[in-house]
Amino acid sequence: MIRRAPLLLVVLLLLLHAQTAGAEGTWQGTLTKNIQQWIQTISRQDPQFAAWKRADTEIRALGVNQHQWLVTVREDGRQVGYLVVGEVDTAASGSGPVFALLEYGAGAYILFDEAIAPDDGTAVPVYDGFASFWQVTDKEQTRYVDAKTGERYPEGFLPDPPTMGSVEPDGLVTAEKKLTAARVLTAQETNPFDRIDWVMKAADKTRDSSRDDAWQTLTQPSAHQPAILTVSLFHDQVTAPFTIGSVHLWSDEAAYVGVWDEGLRFLPISYVRQVGTLIK
């Protein structure tokens, strides 16, 4: 028995390792398959993503234990877009990992672009839609740097509680959903500051920006005029305006709003309604 015990232990460890490796293989395979499915359906339906048809991808984790991944899309070595993928709670599924598309965009300037990342080894990427940032901590203070522009927020500014995590899974794109329609409101990047009316309207706190009819109109075939979306960040200390350039309609009534922000940037309308004010 004394001689056989170590052998039995080795066998058990080998079996455990094989099971773990198999689970990791299934998890990675599912993630990769989902990403390729989304890239295919988006590039087929929207000519603005045509470069994705011939693209390669690179996947890297965002932050620590966030269960989110940044997918960089490249064509011939050039960045042509990105996706942000999150793992949905699998307690109810019971059939393996379930991933959701949190955000995606087209253009050379991606989210959490290494070219504009803080030159600091302690910088941690934190994803939360429009409020995404790098968190840089040193002995003196914690600094926050915008994940899309690389701009540093002023000292003393603190991020809002995360919002993207509260979006219902039904409003997110998962593996079985397909892009059914892509509506372009403006194919050219437009500076929201070309319109000044949004400044007063965004400041009017009596406006009901969550009215269903306003958002539903945005997803209708009759929608053809670009609108302005304003988002308050860092406890209302920052107001970020965006021109809405496109709307993507997915199966099962999921919709994503595309704004111009150094390229196109699509986020779930269920999230955008929580954080933004729509000005038409």
Image: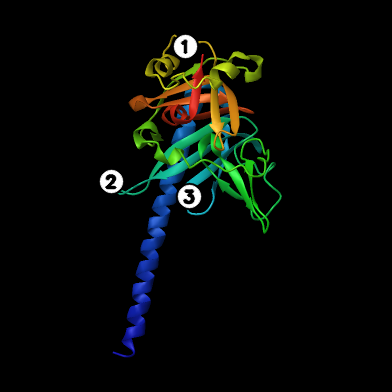
Tell me what residue is drawn at x 35 percent, y 34 percent. Answer: 176
Q: Is residue 232 left or right of residue 15?
A: right
Q: Which residue is mark 3?
A: 66
The answer to whether residue 228 shows anywhere in this view is no
> What separation in Å lies between label 3 and label 1 (alpha carbons)?
36 Å
Quarter in which the N terminus is drawn: bottom left
> What separation in Å lies between label 2 and label 1 (alpha carbons)?
37 Å
- Relative to residue 103, is residue 118 depicted above or below? below
Tell me what residue is drawn at x 44 percent, y 30 percent. Answer: 274
- Relative to residue 202, is residue 271 depicted above or below? below
Three-letter code for the amino acid on which mark 2 is drawn = Ala
Q: Which residue is mark 1?
A: 223
Q: Which mark is residue 161?
A: none
Dot 2: what SS? loop
Where residue 146 sits, quadrant-wise, is: top right
Rendered location of residue 194, percent (x, y):
66, 15
Task: Please state which of residues 278 and 50 is positioned toward the viewer in this rendering.
Answer: 278
Q: Which mark is residue 92?
A: 2
Q: Is residue 119 left or right of residue 102?
A: right
Q: Mark 2 or mark 1: which comes first in sequence?
A: 2
